[in-house]
């Protein structure tokens, strides 16, 4: 979905998705999740993958909106919600006994994704001050 969106709409201040730290963090979380959930129950693995894909795709969709727009803020809030869901599902996996070194790294990546999305949202709520 992210690549389709980029072909169909301008991205504004970002030359590519790779220039957006929040998108890169969401993608890194998804990339790490895919192999890590292979031994999990199917429903938990599927929900975790879907939430991670959603966080990444919605972040890409946010970039198609103007910087100070309601649409971008809505997308970023939805992406944060999806990223928090990923972290919640990772905590659930730990509670179910799937605590591994991979899970610790996934939790770190999920937390980074949440933090960068929140900073991105914060940056879209007020204009950049003009130089005098």
Image (cartoon, helix red, strand yellow):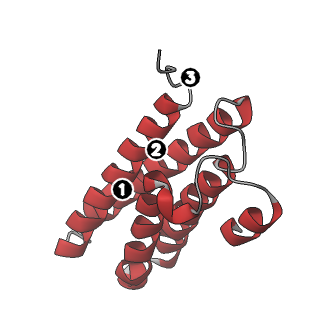
The residue that appears at 56% across and 22% down in the rendered structure is: 127
Q: Which residue lies most toward the front here?
A: 132
Residue 65 appears anywhere in the view: yes
Image location (x, y in percent) of residue 11: 68, 53
Front residue of this view, candidates 38 and 124: 124
Front residue of this view, candidates 124 and 89: 124
Q: Which residue lies most toward the left here?
A: 101
Q: Give the spatial CA distance, label 1 vs label 3.
A: 28 Å
Q: Give the spatial CA distance, label 1 vs label 2.
A: 11 Å
Q: Earlier in the sequence, mark 1 or mark 2?
A: 1
Q: Is residue 10 left or right of residue 80?
A: right
Q: Earlier in the sequence, mark 3 or mark 2?
A: 2
- In the rendered view, would you say 29 is above or below 125? below
**Mark 1 closeness class: few <14, some 14–19, many ≥20 residues within 10 Å:** many
The residue that appears at 70% across and 31% down in the rendered structure is: 69
- Which mark is drawn over residue 110? 1
Q: Secondary structure at mark 3?
A: loop
Q: Secondary structure at mark 1?
A: helix
The residue that disc 3 covers is: 127
Q: Secondary structure at mark 2?
A: helix
Q: Give the spatial CA distance, label 3 vs label 2.
A: 17 Å
The residue that disc 2 covers is: 117
């Amino acid at each position: 979905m992210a690549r389709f969106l980029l072909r169909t709409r301008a991205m504004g201040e970002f030359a590519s998705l790779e220039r957006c730290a929040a998108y890169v963090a969401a993608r890194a979380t998804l990339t790490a999740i895919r192999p890590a959930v292979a031994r999990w129950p199917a429903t938990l693995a599927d929900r975790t993958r879907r939430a991670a894909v959603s966080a990444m795709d919605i972040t890409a969709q946010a970039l198609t909106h103007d910087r100070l727009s309601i649409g971008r803020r809505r997308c970023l809030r939805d992406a944060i919600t999806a990223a928090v869901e990923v972290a919640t599902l990772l905590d659930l996996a730990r509670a179910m006994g799937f605590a591994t070194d991979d899970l610790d790294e996934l939790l770190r990546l999920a937390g980074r994704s949440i933090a960068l999305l929140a900073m991105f949202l914060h940056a879209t709520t007020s204009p950049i001050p003009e130089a005098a």
